[in-house]
Image (tube, rainbow, N blue to C red):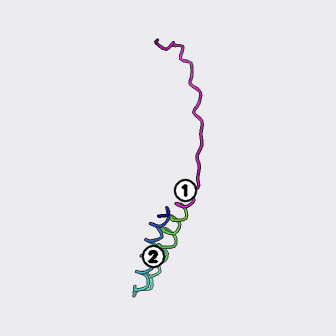
Amino acid sequence: MAPGDTYRARALELLARAEVETYPETRAEFENLAAAFFLRLAEQAERNTKLVIEFELPPEKDSGHKPKP
């Protein structure tokens, strides 16, 4: 399953609820929530899979103590 599929499925559920909603304001809220929140999360999840974070640890500081043999 692709990383954004769960969010897309939730967006589709909300769009299905919007289709049967009788109050226009509530219908619009379901549609907005699906598009503005869950579809954006799906897009972000896809971008995150392509993200590579690289870093280097700083060199260890000499504390003046010699390691025990």
Q: Identify the residue at horizontal 48%, vertical 78% (top origin).
A: 31
- Which span is picked out in magenta? 45-69
Label 2 residue SS: helix
Name the amino acid type tagged 1. Answer: Thr
Which one is nearer the viewer's eye here, 2 or 9?
Answer: 2
| Helix, strand or loop: magenta stretch | loop
Name the amino acid type tagged 2. Answer: Leu
Q: Which mark is residue 12?
A: 2
- Label 2: few (<14), some (14–19) or many (≥20) C-alpha neighbours in 10 Å: some
Per the image, is 23 magenta?
Answer: no
Locate residue 54 relative to residue 42 in the image: left or right: right
Q: Which mark is residue 5?
A: none
Q: Quadrant of residue 17?
A: bottom left
Residue 21 coordinates in the image, percent (x, y): 40, 85
Residue 36 coordinates in the image, percent (x, y): 52, 70
Which one is nearer the viewer's eye here, 59 or 21?
Answer: 59
Q: Which residue is mark 1?
A: 49
- Label 1: few (<14), some (14–19) or many (≥20) C-alpha neighbours in 10 Å: few
Residue 33 coordinates in the image, percent (x, y): 47, 72
Q: Identify the residue at horizontal 48%, vertical 73% (top origin).
A: 34
Q: Real-space Cα distance between discs 1 and 2? A: 22 Å
First in sequence: mark 1 vs mark 2: 2
Per the image, is 57 magenta?
Answer: yes
Q: Quadrant of residue 61?
A: top right
Q: Identify the residue at horizontal 48%, vertical 70% (top origin).
A: 8
Label 1 residue SS: helix
